[in-house]
Image: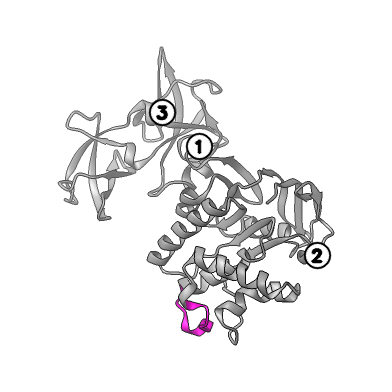
């Protein structure tokens, strides 16, 4: 396996810039997930690592070797696409072994590689089938098996689970994570699904507008988002935000909204009293309690099975609350809420995290 170093990478399509100077060091054996909304540049970056897109500026190094000018076949990487891209006239075994046959590997080496990959992916009973006789999840496992037999320096995954239904995605996420644990292969995985990113990654690279917003472990991004974009993108249901003015009084701080409602805030540096700020709190951290300082009206209830997402209006301000209390199933009810100061996130007028 190998490390992958991305240094000052820029990409433009004609006069339209897509990536604006990306720097990223991926360690040998690490599973890194590139996550962000459509159009953020994550798939373009992956294709540049694979050699499927030219680099406008910057360098890409695999195992210390600059690969900007190398053809995809010479980079010793394997890619798993959103579309399975299997040969319909070939059996599962032939699809998996195709790249080794092109390299004129020995029959013994091919048989051993296919057998080993099939065992890891549970494909042994399917080796003689054609793709049309397989389910979507089985086809995706074949596509991964085809990559594994090559024993490349790195695996690249481009939204490989997007075509699967929710239950299959859940199953395949577990299989990919187990597979990485077995192989310890350097892997880069692209997705717009933050649940996939949180469950799979050693580190997440959050991207927006062609710029890396934050790099860290899943819990780093969840607990200490660097800015409003990361705070809003990571987590489901999404974080609540309130815009207002940051006010300091003694040892305490508050946020005053435009409608003159005052919410608790944390005392932090990097901002002066009276400056614009945004307060954030995750729905699961809002506390429902009889002695709560805020009164809200329940507008909408979304049962999820495990818990309940409540849409509440507090002084004309919308707020989402996640609770496990099934007694809170009455739209139109009045509830008392608290926003614990130690669970609050504060961002400055530019959207950057404070404190």
Nearest to the eye among marks 3 and 2: give it: 2
Q: Which residue is mark 3?
A: 255
Query: From the viewer's perspective, is 286 left or right of 100?
Result: left
* Residue density around tag 2, few if under 14, some if 14–19, many if 20 or more, within 10 Å: few
Element under disc 2: loop
How many other residues sit within 10 Å of disc 3, few (<14), some (14-19) or many (≥20)?
many
Residue beneath label 1, please? Answer: 220
Quarter of the image for residue 109 reads bottom right
Chain-order first, disc 3 or disc 2? 2
In this view of the protein, can residue 82 be seen by the observer?
A: no
* Crowd tier of the residue under label 1, counting other residues whose Cα lies within 10 Å: few below 14, some 14–19, many 20 or above: some
Q: Residue at x 53, y 20 (%)?
A: 269
Q: Tell me: residue 198, above or below residue 257.
A: below
| Residue 56 lies in quadrant | bottom right
C-alpha separation, residue under disc 1 versus residue under disc 2 = 36 Å
What distance separates the C-alpha of mark 3 from that of mark 1?
A: 25 Å
Q: Is residue 230 magenta?
A: no
Q: Circle 1 — which element?
A: helix
Query: Which residues fall within the magenta stretch?
Result: 126-136
Q: Secondary structure at mark 3?
A: strand
Task: List the residue tagged with mark 2.
Answer: 71
């Amino acid at each position: 396996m190998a490390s992958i170093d991305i240094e000052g990478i820029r990409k433009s399509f004609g006069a339209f810039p897509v990536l604006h100077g990306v720097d990223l060091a991926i360690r040998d054996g690490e599973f890194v997930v590139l996550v962000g909304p459509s159009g953020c540049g994550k798939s373009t970056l992956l294709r540049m690592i694979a050699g499927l897109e030219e680099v406008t500026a910057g360098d890409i190094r695999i195992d210390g070797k600059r690969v900007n000018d190398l053809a995809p076949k010479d980079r010793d990487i394997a890619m798993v696409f959103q579309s399975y891209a299997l040969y319909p006239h070939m059996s599962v075994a032939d699809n998996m072994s195709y790249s080794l046959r092109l390299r004129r590997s020995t029959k013994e080496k091919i048989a051993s590689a296919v057998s080993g990959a099939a065992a890891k992916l549970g494909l042994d009973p399917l080796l003689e089938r054609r793709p049309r006789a397989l389910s979507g999840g089985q086809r995706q496992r074949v596509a991964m098996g085809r990559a594994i037999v090559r024993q490349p320096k790195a695996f690249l995954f481009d939204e490989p689970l997007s075509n699967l239904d929710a239950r299959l995605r859940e199953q395949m996420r577990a299989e990919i994570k187990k597979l990485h644990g077995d192989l310890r292969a350097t892997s880069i995985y692209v997705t717009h699904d933050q649940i996939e990113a949180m469950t799979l990654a050693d580190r997440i690279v959050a991207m927006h507008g062609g710029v890396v917003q934050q790099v860290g472990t899943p819990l780093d991004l969840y607990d200490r988002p660097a800015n409003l974009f990361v705070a809003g993108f990571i987590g489901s249901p999404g974080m609540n935000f309130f815009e207002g003015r940051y006010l300091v009084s003694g040892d305490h701080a508050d946020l005053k909204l435009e409608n003159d409602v005052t919410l608790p805030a944390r005392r932090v540096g990097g901002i002066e009293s009276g400056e614009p700020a945004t307060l954030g709190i995750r729905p699961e951290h809002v506390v429902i309690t009889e002695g709560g300082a805020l009164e809200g009206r329940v507008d909408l209830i979304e049962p999820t099975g495990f818990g309940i997402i409540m849409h509440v209006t507090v002084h004309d301000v919308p707020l989402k609350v996640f609770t496990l209390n099934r007694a809170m199933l009455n739209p139109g009810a009045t509830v008392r809420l608290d926003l614990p100061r130690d669970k609050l996130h504060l961002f400055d007028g530019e959207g950057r995290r404070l404190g």
